[in-house]
Image (cartoon, helix red, strand yellow):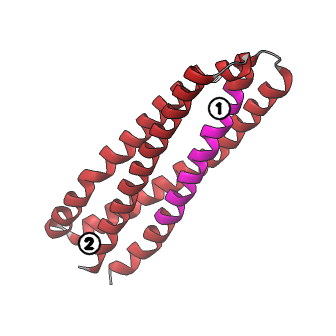
């Protein structure tokens, strides 16, 4: 039954990450609201819509993480009871795919950050600069979350084969 505890702990950690992303989306919405109400300069006013958009993207990420992993907590025990070997093999396959997907994410997000930095450097329009700054903020936060997800996924993936024995 140690594998069930390992699996549910992993899923609970993913749900916790989803809640943290949701909390950040609330903070981003509040910051956007603050810029909307209090900004005086064109640059400050330019942050309102990019921040609202980033907040909505963070809500989508949070919901995706939450709704993908919350049901797994209950499903893990049922799947393990039905066929332990199949459960472990399915988890090994799923975590290997996740490792591959996260490797791609760590190539794409820095490329987006570089593009946003170039946008800031070569644009004089306040809106485009605000979009670039907000994009860098959002991609950096997503890399922070995904680096924790990758570490948890790697540790979980390494533990799974030993659960067979």
Q: Position of residue 31 (x, y in %)?
A: 55, 33
Give the left or right position of residue 45, taking residue 4 as reference: right
Give the left or right position of residue 127, taking residue 78 as reference: right
Q: Position of residue 133 (x, y in %)?
A: 70, 32
Q: Which quarter of the rendered picture does the C terminus lie within?
A: bottom left
Depth check: 31 or 154 in front?
31
Dot 1, how many residues are within 10 Å of its Cα: few (below 14), some (14-19), or many (20+)?
A: many
* Alpha carbon distance from label 1 to label 2: 40 Å
Residue occupying image coordinates x 19% and y 62%: 79
Q: Where is residue 135 in the image (x, y as percent from the top left)?
A: 65, 32
**What is the secondary structure assignment of the residue under circle 2?**
helix
Segment colored magenta = 131-152
Q: Where is residue 77 in the image (x, y as percent from the top left)?
A: 19, 66
Q: Does the magenta segment cover residue 110?
A: no
Q: Is the magenta stretch mostly helix, strand or loop?
A: helix
Residue occupying image coordinates x 39% and y 73%: 160
On screen, residue 87 above or below 62? below
Q: Nearer the viewer, mark 1 or mark 2?
A: 1
Quadrant of the rendered image containing residue 9: bottom left
Residue occupying image coordinates x 65% and y 32%: 134
Which mark, residue 105? none
Quadrant of the rendered image containing residue 122: top right
Q: Name the residue under label 1.
A: 134
On screen, residue 156 above or below 66? below
**What is the secondary structure assignment of the residue under circle 1?**
helix
Q: Earlier in the sequence, mark 1 or mark 2?
A: 2
Q: Mark 2 points at which residue?
A: 4
Depth check: 102 or 17 in front?
17
On screen, residue 108 above or below 29? below
């Amino acid at each position: 039954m140690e594998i069930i505890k390992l699996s549910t702990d992993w899923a609970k950690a993913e749900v916790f990450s989803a809640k943290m992303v949701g909390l950040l989306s609330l903070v981003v919405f509040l910051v956007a609201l603050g810029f909307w109400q209090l900004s005086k300069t064109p640059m400050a006013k330019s942050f309102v819509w990019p921040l609202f958009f980033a907040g909505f993207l963070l809500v989508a990420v949070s919901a995706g993480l939450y709704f993908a992993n919350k049901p797994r907590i209950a499903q893990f025990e049922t799947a393990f009871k039905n066929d332990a070997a199949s459960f472990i093999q399915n988890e090994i396959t799923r975590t290997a795919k996740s490792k591959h997907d996260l490797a791609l994410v760590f190539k794409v997000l820095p490329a987006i950050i570089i593009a946003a930095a170039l946008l800031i450097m070569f644009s004089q329009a306040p809106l485009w600069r605000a979009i670039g700054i907000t994009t860098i903020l959002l991609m950096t936060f997503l890399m922070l979350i995904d680096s924790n997800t990758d570490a948890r996924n790697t540790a979980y993936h390494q533990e799974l084969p030993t659960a067979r024995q």
